[in-house]
Image (cartoon, rainbow, N blue to C red):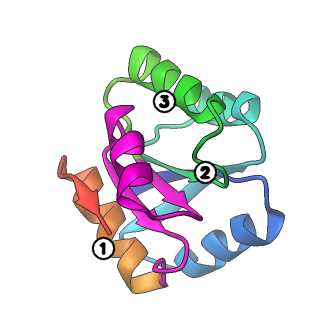
Amino acid sequence: MIQLAVLDEQTMFLHGIRYAFDGNHCIHVVGESHNDVSLFEIIAQAPVDVILLCVNTPKDISYTNIVRYIHHDYPTVKILVVANEDTDQIVHSLMQTGINGYISKRQANCQELEKAIHIVAAGGIYIG
């Protein structure tokens, strides 16, 4: 089973992800976070395979610090970014930080998101 942690500022999105995977036999949401501090607490307390990192403003540098920290302290954890913007420049910039996948919030229906999580968890790269 894939252990998933989710970081987003929006409570509705966090609840939506938990609801979407409730009862899923392949993906289990181990924790939801509104900020990086509580995300790091989740990672420290529970085994996490994939982090679903929601980037509302890809130009915001804070997500790169989160990615660096995760790579440094938890190198086996994969990172799938969900972002509002999906231009080629934004996707390229996000991929350069070392994330394992990207999906647009506009594209992220349950089936596509589940597919992306499985690919990233297996060590693949996903660009939606």
Locate residue 22, reporting x and y percent: 58, 77
Locate residue 4, reporting x and y percent: 49, 53
Q: Nearer the viewer, residue 26 or 88?
A: 88
Q: Which label number is shown at residue 55?
A: 2
Circle 3 sits on which residue?
67
Q: Are marks 1 and 2 in contact (CB under 8 Å)?
A: no
Under mark 3, the amino acid is: Val
Q: Are marks 3 and 1 in contact (CB under 8 Å)?
A: no
Under mark 1, the amino acid is: Lys
Q: Nearer the viewer, residue 103 or 85?
A: 85
Region rendered in magenta: 80-109
Instruction: Tell me which residue sits at (39%, 31%) in the image.
Output: 97
Q: Residue furthest top?
A: 72
Locate residue 68, reporting x and y percent: 47, 21
Circle 1 sits on which residue?
115
Instruction: Tell me which residue sits at (41%, 15%) in the image.
Output: 72
Q: Which of marks 2 and 1 precedes in the sequence?
A: 2
Quadrant of the rendering where the C terminus is positioned: bottom left
Mark 3 neighbour class, 10 Å CA radius: few under 14, some 14 to 19, many 20 or more:
some
Rounded to the nearest whole Å, what is the CA distance between mark 3 and mark 1?
22 Å
Q: Nearer the viewer, mark 3 or mark 1?
A: 3
Which of the 4 image quarters holds residue 62?
top right
Under mark 2, the amino acid is: Val
